[in-house]
Image (spheres, rainbow, N blue to C red):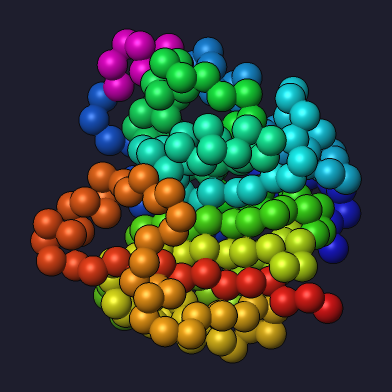
Amino acid sequence: MNTGTSPYRTRAREAFFGRLKGPKLRDRQRQLIEEVLPTRRVDLAKEAPADPASLFDTAVENVRLEIGFGGGEHLHHETARFPRTGFIGVEPFVNGMAKLLGALDESPRDNLLLFDDDATLLLDWLPDSSLAGIDLFYPDPWPKKRHFKRRFVNEKNLDRFARVLKPGAKFRFASDIDTYVNWTLLHCRDHSAFEWLAEGPADWETPYEAWPGTRYEAKAKREGRVPAYLTFVRARA
C-alpha cells in the first residue's frame, strides 16, 4: 500500500544497471534537458495524488506508463493516437530522453509527463489501481545467467505492476530475445495477478495495433532476431 510519503529518492537505484549517458549531447539537446525536462518531470518529492490524471495540465481520462522508452518512437506515437490518455514515460538514459524531447520540440504533446530515474521509484510512489496500462518494450535482456537478477521482469516488479494496474488493465512486453520472452512468460504464469490470453502464434507474432516500430527492433530484424509481442491482463479480484 502506498503511504503517500516520498522517501524513494533517498534509496539506491534498484532496477537500472545500464548506461546513463552516451555520446556528448548537442547544445540544443542539453538545453532541452536543462530547461524543458523539469517542466515535464514527475516530482516524487510531492505527495502522490489519489488519481495520477490530476498530474496533467490537460484533462485525461486515464494514465498509461511506458518503462524504458529508448528514443521515444512508440511513446511519441501513442500520445498522438490517444490525446485523452495521459502518458508517463520513464527513461534514465540521458541521450534517449534528449531524443524524445527533441521530438516534442517539433511536435508538442500536452498529455505526456516524464521521469528520468529508476522506474521502481515511480512505481512505489503511484497509488493503488491507478494505471490503465504498462508497456515494457525491448528491455535490456541481461543474457548472461549471472545477470538474470538484473532483468526488470521479476517477482518483485510484477508485484509492483499488480498493485498499480487497474483490474483488466494490460501489461505489454516486447523482446527479440527468446530467453527473456520465455523468462517473462514463466514469471507471469507464476504470478496470480496476470493472465496471458494468447490462443495461438498470431497473438505473439503480430505487432500491436498501429505499432510504429523502433530503431532497436529494426536492428534486431536485420540481424535475424524475431520479436515477440506479449500481452498480459491484470486479473480482476
Q: Which residues are magenta?
A: 25-31
Q: Going 72% across and 68% down the picture, which residue do you hit?
A: 168
Residue ID at (42%, 30%)? 100
Predominant SS of the magenta segment = helix
In the picture, which quadrant includes the N terminus? Answer: bottom right
Q: Quadrant of residue 86?
A: top right
- Is 218 displayed left or right of 111 in the figure? left
Magenta segment includes 30: yes
Q: Is residue 125 left or right of residue 100?
A: right
Residue 50 falls in which quadrant of the image? Answer: top right
Say left or right for 53 vs 98: right
Q: Position of residue 137 (x, y in %)?
A: 42, 57
Kindly tell me whether residue 152 is visible in this rendering.
no
The quadrant in which residue 150 appears is bottom left
- Residue 6 on image: x %, y %: 78, 44
Q: Residue at x 56, y 24 (%)?
A: 109
Locate the C terminus and report the quarter of the image it occupies.
bottom right
* Image point (26%, 24%), residue name: 24
